[in-house]
Amino acid sequence: MKEFLIRLLDGLSEKEISSDHKETLRNLLNLGAITSHNNKFYLNNGFVCGKLDISSNGTGFLMPFDKRFKQDILIENKNLNNSHYRDIILAKLLPLNKKRQSAKVVLTLKPANETSVVYTKHFGRAILGVNLKTGLSIALKATQKSLKALPIGTLLKINNLNNEITEVIGNINDPFSDEKISLAIYNKNDKFSEASEFEAKAWGDSVDASMYPNRADLRELEFCTIDPIDAKDFDDAIYFDEKNLEIYVAIADVSEYVSSYGAIDKEAKTRGFSIYFPHIAIPMLPRSLSENICSLKPDVARLAFCFKIKLNKNLDVVGEELFEAIITSKKRFNYDEIDEILEDKRASEIFWIKPLFELTSNLRAKRLKNAFDFRTEELRMSLDDEGKLLATRFESDSNSHRLVEDCMLLANKAAAKLIDGRGVFRNHGTPDIRKIENLLQDLASLGFDFVYESDLANLIRKIQAQADAMGNREEIDKLIIKAQKKAEYSAQNLGHFGLGFDRYTHFTSPIRRYSDLTLHRLLKAKMKNDKKLFNYLLLNIESTCASLSELEREADKVAYDFMDRKFARWAKERIGQRFKAYVSENQNMLVAKLDDEIKGARIYLNSYSAELLQKLIIEITDADIASGEIFAKVVKKIDV
C-alpha cells in the first residue's frame, strides 16, 4: 500500500496498478483525491497520505509518505474520523492558520489492525475499555450492566470499526493471558481453519517412496539435522561428502503438500511466518505438517528439495545441482551437542561433522573479506509454572550455529542464481548517509574517532577492529546494526550489503517462512521449463513481497510484545528495588537495558542524561503491565 501511494505522487499508469490496489484507486477517484492526466493517475494537491500516530491525549500525528513535508502533520481528535493508531490514511490539509500544518482524516486506506485489545477499568461510575497500545479509553458497544458483570481488568478484543466486543481474552492480571494478548494485538491466530486442518491431516504420517519414482533416493546418505534443543519442526538437513567436497543441503519439500491457493496456502500467506514465544511456537502451517509429515525427523523417510554444492580445493563453488529427493535423517542433533563434538568433548557416529566444520570455517573467512561478522546475542527467556518470568540468558552464535549458517548461505545463494529477473529476493540496502553520520557521533562519545568515508564496508570493518581492541565489540555491533537498513523481501534483486552478496534469497525454511515456500514453487516451475506456471506464480509478486516484509516485522513485534509484558509483570513486583543497567538509547529519550541477574528489559528513565553504554544503578519506580513499559530513576553511575 505504501509503495502504491508513494508512486501516485509522481504518476502511476493503470497497467502498473495491481488488482490489490484497484479498489483503493476507485475510492480515491470517488473522493476527488486523485485525477488522471496523460494516462497516469496523480494525487491531487491538498491531499496527503501517510501513517497515523496517536498520542496518549488523543491527538493524531500524520507521518506523510510525501518527502516534501519536513515534519508530521497535526490531526486534532475531532478530525480523526474513527481512524486508529498506525492506520494508513488519506487526509485533507486544513487552511494554515498556525505555524504547524494540520489536516483531517478523509479515509482509512489500510487499517493497521481490524481489531484492538482493551481491558475494562472504572472511570467514575462507568466502565470503559482502555486500549493496551495507546492507553486511550473508549466507550464499548455493550451495556454497563453486562460490563459490570465482568471482573475489572477483563481483556476484550473489539472491532475497530464499531467498538463491538468480538472476544473475551482473559484478564490483565493473569500471566497466562500474555500469549493471547500479544497475538490479539497484532490480529494473529493460534488456531487453523477446519479446512486447513482437514487438508493437512489428509497427507498422513509417512512417506511411501514407491509413489515417487522420479525423485533422487538419498536415504542411504548420512543426513542429520542441527537445531535448538526445543525445536519441534526441522526444515533442513545436511550431509557432507568429504571425498568429493560436496555439501548436500536438503530442505523440507513443503510445496509438495501445500498447493497454491488452497486452504492451507491461504492461511500460510496471511500468517507469513511462524511466531516464537519462550514456551511455545505458533506455526505458519498446521502442526500435522510442520511437526510431522514435512518435518525432517530422524529415522523416517521424508521428501526434500535438495542442493548438491560441489567445491574445488580452493573452496570455489564449481557446481550447484538442485533436485527433488527422498532422504532419511540419521540423527537429530541440537547445537550444544555439535559444539561438544567440535570441542572433542563428545564422540559422534556422524564422522563428517568435524571435516565439514573445518571447510565451512575456511569458507567463512573467505566470505568475510567482503562481508561482516556481527557478534549478536539473542535474548532467551524462561517462565515458571505460573507463567511468570523465571530467568533470562543471552544466546550467542557458537561454532555449531556458524557451521549450519554457512551451509544455508551456500544454498540460499545458489537458489538466488536460478531466478532471473523477477522472483523472491532477500535484499539488504546500503545504509543511509544520515544514519551513518549519527552512528559516528554516537561512537565519538565512546572514544571512537572516525570520519565518514564512501567505502562503508571498509569503514565498518575499521570500527569493528577498534571495538575488538577496546573490548566492547558486542555493544558496538548493536549500534552498527541499528544504523543499517532492515533486510526486506522484493520481487527485484538489489543485492545484500551485510552479506556482501550480489544476489541472495531465502530457500532454507519453507516450514516457517512463506517467502521460501513461494520460492520453491518458482524454482520447480523453472526446472520443468513451465513458463506459463512460472508467470502465473509471479502474479502480484511485488505486493506479496511487500506484505511478507511487513508480516516479518509483525512476527517480531508479537514476540517482543510478549517479552515486554513478562518483564513488566516482573518489575511490578519489584518497585523500589535497585538493579544494574546500561544506557541503550539516549536520543529522543533515555532508555536503559537491565543487566543484572535478569537481563534485557527496556527501562525508561526520566529527568536524566547519560552517554551511550554508561553503566548505571537504577531503582524501579513503576511498571505498566498493559503497555509492557517499565520506569525507573537513576541512583548512580557506575565508573568502569
Image (cartoon, rainbow, N blue to C red):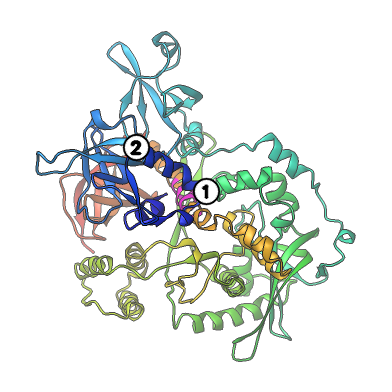
In the displayed structure, does residue 290 sit left or right of residue 389?
right
Mark 1 crowd level (few <14, some 14–19, many ≥20, 10 Å Cα): few
Residue 323 included in the magenta stretch of the image: no
* Residue at image mark 1: 19
Crowdedness near tag 2: few (<14), some (14–19) or many (≥20) residues, C-alpha within 10 Å: few
Q: Nearer the viewer, mark 1 or mark 2?
A: 2
Q: Which residue lies under the disc numbered 2?
A: 31
Three-letter code for the amino acid on which mark 1 is drawn: Ser
The answer to which quarter of the image holds residue 511 is bottom right
Quarter holding the C terminus is: bottom left
Mark identifier at residue 278:
none
Q: Position of residue 637 (x, y in %)?
A: 19, 55
Task: Compare marks 1 and 2 and give the one earlier in the sequence.
Answer: 1
Looking at the image, which residue is at 23% across and 65% down? Answer: 438
Which residue is rendered at x = 20% and y = 60% of the image? 611
Region of the chain picked out in magenta, as a range: 548-557
Amino acid residing under circle 2? Leu
In the structure shown, which secondary structural element does the residue marked by tag 2 occupy? loop
Query: Residues at badges 1 and 2 in contact (C-beta under 8 Å)?
Result: no
Residue in the image at 44% along x and 77% along y: 371
- Tell me the chief SS of the magenta region: helix
At mark 1, the secondary structure is helix
